[in-house]
Image (cartoon, rainbow, N blue to C red):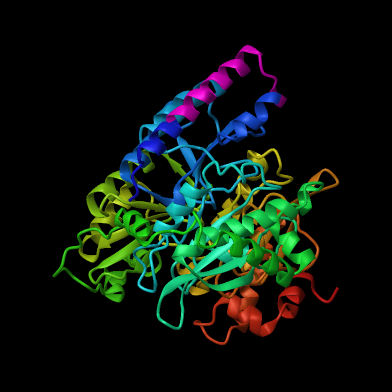
Amino acid sequence: MYRYDEFDAAFVEGRTAQFADQVARRLSGELSEDQFRPLRLMNGLYLQLHAYMLRIAVPYGTLNSRQMRKFAHIARTYDRGYGHFTTRQNIQFNWPKLRDVPAILGELASVEMHAIQTSGNCIRNTTADQFAGAAADEIIDPRPIAEIIRQWSSLHPEFTYLPRKFKIAMTGAPNDRAAIRFHDIGLQAATNGAGDIGWEVWVGGGLGRTPMIAKLINSFVPNEHLLAYLESIMRVYNRYGRRDNKYKARIKILVHEEGLETIKGQVEAEFAEVRGGVLTLPAEEVDRITAYFAPPEFKTGTATKIDVAYESIIDPAYGRWLDHNINSHRQPGYASVTISLKPIGGAPGDATDAQMDAVADIAERYAFDELRVSHEQNLVLPHVAISDLRTVYDALVAAQLAEGNAGLITDIICCPGMDFCSLATARSIPIAQEIGRKFASAERQADIGDLKIKISGCINACGHHHVAHIGILGVEKKGGELYQITLGGDATENASVGKIIGPGFEAEQVPDAIETLVDTYIARRTSADESFIAAYRRLGEAPFKEALYGNA
């Protein structure tokens, strides 16, 4: 894993001291809330419905046990005993007191973490495939380049005040687990005719009130020119992005209105000027950063297979966990483990201080002291010996973290909604909880198979409902809450935006509506192997719409 250098440490220490002074002036009344707002946002501090919320960066979703224990300590000491892991692989604390925030930032700095670039109109925390460096299908580990992008973008003088926030995602595999086509810039590992590894560059994706799938602007950019190419895109966006209307300020609108070829021409013109200059990335620098992400010293001669069918007979719960929460690893004898933060009836993405401590202990003992946060609001142990899986499972059972539902209907992505967020127009968490209870049966979940439900409490789409197989959007209507349902979204390499299927539902009607959709799918699928999204694409919306609304 990457370790801060002297610049990082001095930079974070200086920022922490600076913000402590700003907080003191706010508490004394020297600064008004309007004056304080841009200062706190530069340090990841939001003002939510009931309290401040602090969002902490987890670069490309990678952290170690010491950092996870620090999260647990912060939850215990400064919050209400839990944290919320987000779709940008960050963690949020929903109840810190303003006077305590400088102390929290100081605690974070002691473990090489901070809250910079988690808010505001800047380049946000770069996200990556949660199985990066471990996945069997991976071309290259994207995290070294993600770290280089972090260093390049941190307080970049030209891009500190962009037209709007800007998000970058990366994957080193052909199977997209980072939703790169729904980011302002998406990077996917690629090879050219000579067999060299570089990056496809996608631009103009996003969700929110105007969901759009990114467009391929360059099919191959080598490492040495990637920063120059990204900078060229950023310059074009910074120059021409709308600043008169925040709803039209994202690069997706610029690409849509000007056309990809026009934007590409402008980017190529910028690229021609900076290519070969100071932004050229030397191979030795890539090698230096890559060394920080060297694979751990894997054991050899250990078990390379596990009989899931046999284990399911002996212990059905363990068998389900093996079936759904284990991902294949590039190293024989190892697997990646998804730790579900989606217990039945729980708030998706939440973990208590005790659970974070337990996960840290497990990672330290059985996963080479490494953890990941997924954009699906779960945690991952990237490198676990197959021979240790039962021990890890038992430890997760003790921590109430052994739900074997990764990728199933109860593995719901959900924003905080109106329980916390000042922008939300409807609640999200209670809807997710009731759907979870409706489909609590493990046998039924397994029969349904791969089905992604995602819930947003407002049009900003922090719950990614647009790219769910079944998406749920809460809206305000006549002082009440109404929930629209979309079908057919997909955040993978087969990207698609879901379509609103009809009129919205009252909150208490939503679980039954989801059940109707699921029953329709099961009745019409060609076999148990045909997934919900495959069946929807084959059948179209008509049978689902008729099941929900009749012939009206």
Residue 454 appears in the rendering: no
* In the image: residue 237, left or right of residue 374: right
Residue drawn at (46%, 47%) of the image: 151
Residue drawn at (32%, 40%) of the image: 66
Residue drawn at (57%, 51%) of the image: 433
* In the image: residue 185, left or right of residue 59: right
* In the image: residue 79, left or right of residue 334: right
Q: Position of residue 447 (x, y in %)?
A: 49, 74
**Rendered view: 157 above or below 238:** above
Q: Position of residue 549 (x, y in %)?
A: 79, 70
Which of the image's four quarters has the C terminus?
bottom right
Q: How many marks?
A: 0
* In the image: residue 444, left or right of residue 414: left
Q: Position of residue 299 (x, y in %)?
A: 17, 63
Residue drawn at (80%, 74%) of the image: 550
Residue 308 appears in the rendering: yes
Q: Position of residue 122 (x, y in %)?
A: 61, 45
Residues drawn in magenta: 13-34
Main SS, magenta region, reads helix
* Camera-side residue of 282 and 15: 282
* Camera-side residue of 466 and 218: 218
**Rendered view: 290 above or below 63:** below
Residue furthest to the bottom in view is 526
* Camera-side residue of 336 and 237: 237
**Rendered view: 407 above or below 381:** below
517 part of magenta stretch: no
* Camera-side residue of 547 and 144: 144
